[in-house]
Structure formats: C-alpha cells, structure tokens
C-alpha cells in the first residue's frame, strides 16, 4: 500500500445521498478528476431518481477536494464465489472463512447472528457496519444504531475499464458488485482490520461475502432466503488497534484502486 501523490491531479470526492419521507433511500460515491464532476454528479443524481415510487424526497450531492498526497493506492481484492445450497450451508462457509482469516468462532457466530436479526439496538438494520473485536466478539462501534460508514473509495480512472472487464469475465455486471468489491478492498487494506462479512439488506439479493486481504473477496450464495430484509456489515478488528484510528481511516481516508488482478 502506498500513501503518496497519484498521477490524477485535482481529484474530488462526490457523494450522493437520497432520502424518502421514511429516511435513508440510497447513496453512492466516486472519486474523480475535476473535469468529470458535472457528468458524474448527473449520473449519481440519475441513480437516485431511478428509485421506485414514491422516489426521493431529497437528494444531496456533496463535492469535496481530495488531498492527493493522502490517497492510498491499493490493489483490488481477487474475487471468487463459493456455492452454498441454503442459508445454513452459507453460514457454515462464512464461519469457516472468517475463522481462517483470524476471527474467533465465537466472534464470527455472534456477528452472523446479529446480521440475520437486526444488528441495531432497536432490532432493525444499521445504517453502517458493526466494529467487532476479532477475538472476544465485543461490539466496539460508539453508536450501535449508525455503526461506521465506509467512505472515500473508488477505482482510479486509468483502470476503471479494466475493472469492468474483470467483473464481466466473472459474470458480475451489476454496479452493486463493483461498489461492494471497491468497498471491501478498501476495508481489507485498512491497518488493524482482520476481516469483513456482508449480508445485503435487499430482500431480492441473497448473495453475501466474506473478505480479507489474504482471502480476497469471497462471494457466498444463498446467505439468506429471498424476501428476508435483514442485512448489514461486520468489520472484525485486531483488539490491540485504536478504534478511533480505524474509524477515521474507514470513514475519511481516500483510497483508490490502481491495480486489477
Ligand atoms: P448493501 O450491500 O448495500 O445491501 O448493504 C448492506 C448493509 O451494509 C446495509 O444495510 C448497511 O448496514 C451496510 N452498509 C451499506 N453501505 C455501507 C457503507 N458504506 N459502510 C458501512 N456499512 C454499509
């Protein structure tokens, strides 16, 4: 991992967030050269408008200059898929992968259980992810309803097309997969992070993943039954690391993927 000036001078973070009357609806973000700001802002706005009725009640687009000297350039995690016939088989796969990444069985089981039953104190899904002590399973995020929101990551423009070709070659065209692999790649390279597990909250999307620097991005089929609205993310951390530093890095440090496997 390098933290140094990259070739792309004048980069900007663009973040879109849309809400309906009921609250959060969708969000997306990019890190792009200055010249692409109008085009990408319009693309992100378009994504919010495309949501089903009643659609967004408000959309915000925020553009911030990125300090290019602070950007970390990282490789994309390699991607593979493991088969699982049903949620119970998928859970066993996820458990085995997490344990092989250095998470204790107790910690992994606790996280998987929380993800499947609403990890927020009110029994609903969280807005962000849980931070969990990889050994003890203790929840460490300061706000267990919000969790931590991973932000400020993208693929460098120079290899964006390569990433699309790479994902197509795996039969994975959906933008959701691209965004998840980019997020998981950032998370895997954050110092102190041991592994991540994700279960989508979309009732129509049943594939989850486990990711770490060593394992790569491992998609697991049938993590839940169709119609199940519970989902979330758990970030397992080394108990000796500083939680403040990890949160700061996950939320604010800009990461760009500059190599596709
Ligand atoms: P999704 O993969 O979009 O279905 O999201 C699944 C769950 O992951 C959501 O319910 C959130 O709890 C969590 N999540 C979504 N986006 C982020 C993010 N940027 N950072 C941390 N957690 C997230």
Image (cartoon, rainbow, N blue to C red):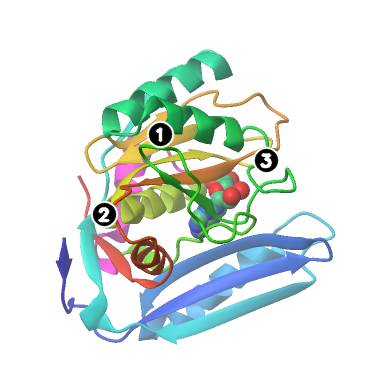
Which range of residues does the magenta coloring cover?
A: 156-174
Residue 43: % across, % down: 55, 69
* 70 is higher (above) or lower (below) than 251: below
Q: Is residue 155 visible?
A: yes
Rendering quarter of residue 56: bottom right
Residue 206 visible to an observer of this rendering: no
Nearer the observer: mark 3 or 2; the answer is 3
Looking at the picture, how far across and down is residue 216, in whole percent? 28, 38
Q: Residue at x 43, y 67 (%)?
A: 251
Residue drawn at the location 25% of the way across and 73% of the way down: 71
Element under label 3? Answer: loop
Along the polypeptide, which appears first: circle 1 or circle 3? 3
* Residue 171: mark in rendering: 1
The residue singled out by tag 3 in the image is 118
Q: Main secondary structure of the magenta part?
A: helix
The quarter holding residue 58 reads bottom right
Give the label, 1 or 3, closer to the camera: 3
**In the rendered image, the vertical position of residue 90 relative to residue 200, given as above or below:** above
- In-front residue for pair 73/11: 73
Q: Is residue 171 magenta?
A: yes
Residue 5: where, in percent of width, then height?
Answer: 17, 79
Q: CA distance from mark 1 to mark 3?
A: 31 Å
Q: How far apart are the two marked residues, 2 and 1, measured between alpha carbons? A: 25 Å
Q: CA distance from mark 3 to mark 2?
A: 27 Å
The numbered disc on residue 189 is 2
């Amino acid at each position: 991992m390098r933290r140094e000036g990259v070739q792309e001078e004048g980069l900007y973070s663009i973040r879109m967030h849309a809400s309906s009357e009921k609250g959060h609806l969708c969000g997306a973000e990019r890190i792009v050269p200055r010249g692409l700001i109008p085009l990408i802002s319009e693309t992100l706005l378009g994504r919010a408008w495309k949501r089903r009725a009643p659609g967004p009640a408000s959309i915000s687009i925020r553009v911030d200059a990125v300090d290019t000297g602070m950007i970390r350039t990282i490789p994309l995690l390699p991607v593979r898929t493991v088969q699982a016939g049903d949620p119970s088989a998928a859970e066993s796969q996820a458990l085995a992968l997490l344990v092989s990444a250095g998470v204790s069985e107790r910690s992994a089981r606790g996280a998987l259980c929380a993800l499947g039953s609403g990890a927020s104190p009110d029994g609903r899904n969280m807005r962000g992810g849980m931070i969990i002590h990889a050994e003890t399973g203790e929840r460490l995020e300061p706000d267990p309803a919000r969790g931590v929101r991973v932000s400020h990551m993208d693929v460098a423009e120079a290899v964006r097309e390569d990433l699309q070709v790479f994902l197509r070659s795996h039969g994975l065209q959906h933008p959701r997969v691209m965004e998840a692999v980019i997020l998981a790649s950032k998370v895997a390279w954050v110092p102190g992070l041991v592994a991540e597990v994700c279960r989508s909250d979309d009732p129509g999307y049943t594939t989850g993943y486990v990711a770490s620097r060593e394992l790569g991005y491992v998609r697991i089929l049938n993590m839940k039954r169709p119609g199940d609205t519970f989902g979330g993310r758990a970030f397992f951390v080394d108990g000796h690391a500083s939680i403040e530093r990890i949160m700061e890095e996950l939320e604010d440090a800009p990461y760009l993927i500059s190599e596709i496997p």
